[in-house]
Amino acid sequence: MSYAHQSRPAHSDRPHRWRRPLAVAAAVATALTGVTGLAGAASPTAATDRSAPPAAAAIPDLTSANRRAPIAGLPDWSKAGYRGGAALPGAAEANPDAACHITAAELASQYGVRADGSDATTGLQRAVDAIRTNCTPSAGYTKLSSITLPAGRIVVTRQLALDADYMVLRGAGMGQTTLAFRPDADTRYDTLTADGSDWDEDGMTHGAGKGGWTWPGRGLLRVQTREVSPRYARDFASAPANRKDIFEGSVNQHWASGVPLREGPAVGATQIKLATNADMLRFKVGAHLWVGAANTARFYQQQTVTDASKYVNLHMRQQIFQIASVDTAGRNLRSTATTAGGGGPVVDVSTAAQLRSALANAQPGQTIRLAAGEYRGAFQTQKAGTASAPITLTGPADAVLVNDGPSGTGPSCPVPTAGVDTGYGLWLYGAPYWKLTGFTVKESKKGVVLDDSHHVTIDGLSVHHVDEEAVHFRRSSADGVIRNSKISHTGLVQAGYGEGVYLGSAGSNWACHGNQGGVDRSDRVQVLDNTFGPKVAAEHIDIKEGTSNGVIRGNTFDGTGISGQNSADSWTDAKGIGYLIENNTGTFSSPGTFANGYETHNPSTSPSFLNGCGNVWRGNRSDLGGVGAYAIKITSTSKCGANPNVVYASNTVTNAGSGLTNVPVTP
């Protein structure tokens, strides 16, 4: 049977159940927590009290690029690891709020955590709790908090609960920080099996609970909630210190507090049908919802799934959703993906007039939900969401926005003006903190344009058959994300302006779009796991001068149809600074004009920047179709002497006229 309960987002499945003495479990638990570092900092080392810190070693490439291809008949591990095989997070993913980063100095002065042999347990837990309270509610994968441990040997005597979502725990550097775990009397197991080789989970009891509820056992770090089900609140209160953890965490929340479903939802369904006796007061719009099912044949049958070909031989499946609406009378919930929804009321629209009204009157936390169908006209908004309550526009792929063409005479620098239609499919102007998910934009002058609209997430959109570019982050629309989207058939009227994703503005347009110190600072935009092509007439991704520190990762480029007009002859043109370009796959086949897979250029601007410098390529796979010269063409090394571009050996190329790159490769 499936169960549902409201919870904070979870990021890992149930770990394996280790049956080993506690000293060994401490080291294993640390390895399984996946603690990482920002900006190249290393993870802390774990050790039992009787072992010395390990020697420093280089961190290997953990991305999916450093894996062999899947082998038929064996499990496919190519997407294992952090976020499906992505690189560990760096500075671009850090929370901009300094209060969400606790430094080693602050650990010492505010929390009493020092590498001087004193017990740091209480202070470390207080630091985690502070991040959980103050930063977790507005955090995310691109807004990570952190705790930096000092160099030296830090003593911990009790299990630390890492229940602050989107938090990074890091050390002072490779081999410099050691967590020494010295379990106190309340942490060491006091019930062992008859031969003394293992802890006796059945003998470790209190009230209705037993030790098996703490699977996989105690360790130095535990990544899960500490919440206690009301069913066990009395047992928890009366439990001694060495039994309280029996009642904390996922067993209680997922199974004791879970609400059975009266019917298993079909794949892709958004309605969740709860048991007829479900307490609906527990479920709030905007909260997160955990839905899980233990996969036995009986459970499938209880969910009315009788087709055995649909069964999957797994221990358990689980998903996290966000609650879009609550039907108290019908005992139903309407869910969205975790990337959709802002936590406020839902506005359902099915006509162009309703959509225009909803966009004009949108409020923080609101979700505007498109019904399937075609919406024709000019759609724009100047309403802002907030970090804690973004506004969502969501719909299925067959909800289609169409703008047949510009009308009226607007100003030379486009701003929303009465009676003027820019021809954009969707235009956000001064509208930060939006989430655009699922729907389609087509047959418009431009697809989606963001002006002065930071922290906008585009997820799962389809943009195709547009006159010029598909998606434009413009006028300092920083800290945005576009992911899981499909872009094709751009530049139908002006091929040279038919970019897939356009980041920033050319320096020649800063007089219009340079709204931060005379510059378009559409910085730190992430382009992730999208599919480009065929017939993207200009660059699939055009990274303009003056922008910096974005991420281009996991995308697929089909270069068929690149026009060559306006120098459009590569998948990506990097004129920005400090971009990470990794784990992308590009191909080219005729027709089209194709010079190189990736290129850099160094335009001069005022104010001046090291444009086209400091970018990094790694793990990219390029097939140039026997036409392109280099997978990665670095136009100038002399102009980037102070901040060189770096091409790693993990990049690969086939069918190249000249080779991988024209600069030395970094191992």
Image (tube, rainbow, N blue to C red):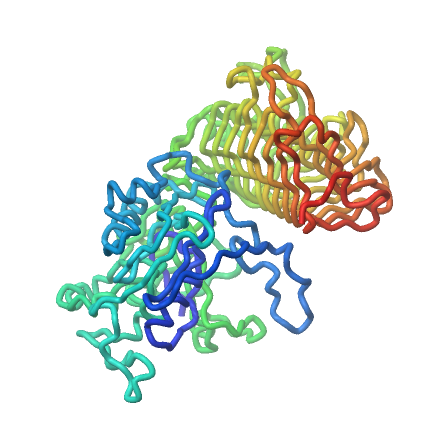
- Decide if residue 414 is on the left or right side of residue 665: left
Rendered location of residue 316, percent (x, y): 45, 69
Q: Nearer the viewer, residue 543 or 466?
A: 543
- Decide if residue 424 is on the left or right side of residue 187: right
Going 77% across and 45% down the picture, which residue do you hit?
Answer: 660
Going 41% across and 61% down the picture, which residue do you hit?
Answer: 53
Q: Is residue 397 visible?
A: no
Rendered location of residue 572, percent (x, y): 70, 36
- Decide if residue 477 is on the left or right side of residue 443: left
Q: Nearer the viewer, residue 326 or 638?
A: 638
Q: Nearer the viewer, residue 302 or 663?
A: 663
The quadrant holding residue 541 is: top right
Q: Is residue 587 visible?
A: yes
For this orientation, the residue located farthest to the left is 238
Rendered location of residue 290, percent (x, y): 39, 58
Going 66% across and 16% down the picture, which residue do you hit?
Answer: 508
Q: How many marks?
A: 0
Going 58% across and 18% down the picture, which residue do you hit?
Answer: 513
Rendered location of residue 337, percent (x, y): 47, 49
Tell me if residue 558 comes above or below residue 156 in the rendering.
above
Q: Quadrant of the N terminus?
A: bottom left
